[in-house]
Amino acid sequence: MTPDDVSRALFQRAPAGLFAMSTDGVIHSANDTFCEWSGFAREDVVGRYFLSLLSRGSKLLFETRFMPLLQTQRALNEMMLTLSTRAGGSRDVLVSSVLDDSGAETLVYAAVFDAAIRLKYERDLLDARRAAETAVARVRILQEAAAGLAPATTLAAFGSALRVSAETATDAALVSVIVADPDGRLELASGDRPLTGIVELAGLLPVQECLSHGRPVVCRSATEIAASFPTLAAGLDAEGVEALCIIPVIEDGTVGGAIACWFQRSRELDENLLDLLAALATQAAPVLERIHLQRQIEHQSLHDSLTGLPNRLSLQRRLRQMLADAELLGHTVGILFLDLDGFKAINDAFGHEAGDQVLHQVAGRLLRSVRAGDLPSRFGGDEFVIACAGVDEDTVRDVARRIRTAVREPLVGLAQGSTVSASIGISLFAPRGAAPITPDALVALADEAMLTSKRTGKNRDTLVTA
Amino acid sequence: MTNTVPTSLTSPSAWAVDVLVRNGVSVVGDPTRPPIIFGPGYGTSQDMWRLVAPQFAEGHRVVMFDHVGSGDSDVSAYDRRKYDSLRGYANDLLEIIRELDLHDVVFVGHSVSAMIGALAAIQEPRRFARLIMLGPSPRYLNDEGYLGGFERADIDALLDALEVNHASWATAMAPTLMQNADRPELAEELAESMARTDTMVAQHFARVTFLSDMRRYLKDISTPTLILQSSDDIIAPLEVGEYLHEHIADSELVVLSAAGHYAHLSDPAEIERQIRRCL
């Protein structure tokens, strides 16, 4: 063979596929090896788009990454692609290519190496690495959630820590953390939510469904949303919500809240992701329970457990604020001190349980008789105190009269048919020109006035001005 | 109670730099003339418009940009939640338009930019005079009664390939970075870290591009639309162009004799001619 023959043979039979193509991907020339690998005759290879010899996944890669990068970098080494052979099989290859614009037409020269073994190994490696990375990401998200949740003492801090973790886990456009108080009232603890100002929180049906059944609610596309929640579909659509998932936070068997993720494209929301969100919810549950308990303790420390009214401590705090506001605004503050007439007799005749029922009924009647913004409280025993801001003598007497009328209505329960009445003392404090007064002093004045009412025949009110 | 925000924080000029730098915006041509914006496709940068866009500099204000995460954009602005849907990209486009105070915009979008432009035009139709879509697709996956061209497994193969080939990106980028580097080993490190970020963005953007379904929004496009579909574009088959034409009310479909998904590179003169028809 002549040197030229050897060169030709080398080109045709090298253990690598060689070809040249134009920048729009049409093959101009190819060697025997390449034709053999593709399974096509030479005349079918030349003039064909290189793209048409690739698997669909590789086509996407070639068009969106390979060609643009080759255009800017002018050379690209060891790109892994999959040839789709004529017989319907596939062949994994490595492609190295250079751009040559020295001639009249810019050409791409490519060398193709068989890489079946190496690519299988790479794929296994990729699977292993992905699994490891997913596990690491999962642990990191849960650790960060734990660190954020641990110090939370308020619903806002709780919600914020949980929301941030759910955002990292899902990339959701919107994440809302919603909590339900023991009475079932919903509160947005953190984040934004769709349909704000259009439907109430309680009207967000996917959230409601999750909370009432204690089960995740998942819609992966706009079609699924429309099928499951037809009344909300148009509204969610208008805000670009195309998928959603709501995960319940279940504390001690009751649903205390939910993590709601809203997506602006259809999402696959696979088991891995839903599991991770469920793990977040599991972590959050005891924290939510602790915060609820703290709230309950705080509520108990400020309320009377028998009547549910604010207690003496609560009255002191709120009255101090009321007096401070009155100084600023020039309001008059009135205190009504109420002691029941005939309560001891009922206690003696029907027992303490009957007495408790009376106190409970009187509390309800007080709430009915006062104005909005007035603050009724149980002071102790059969004594109640009502603090009223922005009153004058007439209005405060009016309140007192309404209370006395309501209290005298016949009782129900164990003391059925009996009646009690109210002796009331009223103290008024007008800040203008007067020296400041303490809450205790103002209440003490009303207490004294009440005693006057008692002495002068009960079931009446006596008013003094501080 | 109302808080007083310092005017420097609310005035547009304070944000000006941010938006334009974030998206690597370049503006050429006559600022007093009608604007044309060129949007790049998935995986590409504004550089792909180099044979077409400059032809309009005379007589137009020509605006080019890169999507965050690609080209000359500020990759640190890549927020996975924002860019988890094409809406994030559409909002960026609207911010650029507002920042440059553009009206009667002719928007030329290649590939995924076509749908990004459509979303922006649906949101603020008064800013747009024309949409020109080059190789668009509202849905890449096949569906019942719809031929998008791809199956879910093909997208997985792409996502795998992006990751497996990550080393190739790094080696491809290194020479560019090394050109001006005093210490080439640092350039390699930089290339490696850039390739990492690049792969992360490319994978996420691929999911958003190839798994989104924009078909439901087509009926809301009120802007006159020109659809330019190559006769043999593997990414967006001809049927997809026909589907778009059927579902966009005021639209025209032109099947290009030009080849492939990058007709603006393979036949720039034809693309220029088609755009001029609309001006």
Image (cartoon, coloured by chain):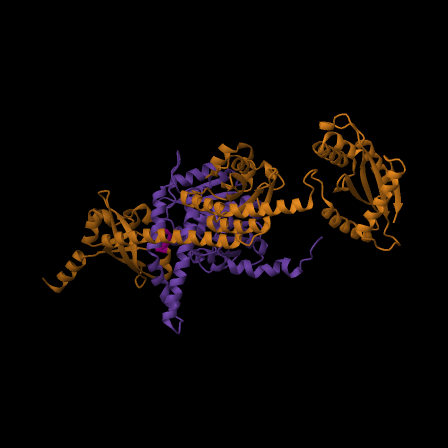
Left or right of residue B46: residue A294:
right
Q: Which residue lies at the image location 36% right of the left edge and 65% below the top edge?
A: B174
Is A359 placed above or below A2 here?
above
Is A421 placed above or below A66 here?
above
Q: Does residue B233 show up?
A: no
Q: Quadrant of the N terminus of chain A?
A: bottom left
Where does residue A459 sit, x and y in percent of width and height?
Answer: 85, 34
Q: Farthest residue in the front direction? A: A348
Where does residue A218 sit, x and y in percent of width and height?
Answer: 47, 38
Where does residue A128 sit, x and y in percent of width and height?
Answer: 32, 52
Q: How many numbered discs sit on the rendered protein?
A: 0
Figure chain in orange: A
Query: Which secondary structure class fits the magenta region best?
Result: helix
Q: Is residue A64 magenta?
A: yes
Q: Farthest residue in the bottom direction? A: B182
Q: Nearer the viewer, residue A207 or B152?
A: A207
Q: Nearer the viewer, residue B63 or A255?
A: A255
Q: Is residue A110 magenta?
A: no
Q: Colour of chain B?
A: purple
Q: Nearer the viewer, residue A250 or A41?
A: A250
Where does residue A11 sit, x and y in percent of width and height?
Answer: 18, 58
* Residue B7 picture quarter: bottom right
Left or right of residue A175: residue A327:
right
- Magenta range is A62-67
Q: Does residue A411 show up?
A: yes
Q: Farthest residue in the top direction? A: A417
Is B135 placed above or below B24 here?
above
Q: Nearer the viewer, residue B198 or B66?
A: B198
Is A200 placed above or below A314 here?
above
Q: Farthest residue in the right direction? A: A456
Left or right of residue B109: residue A463:
right
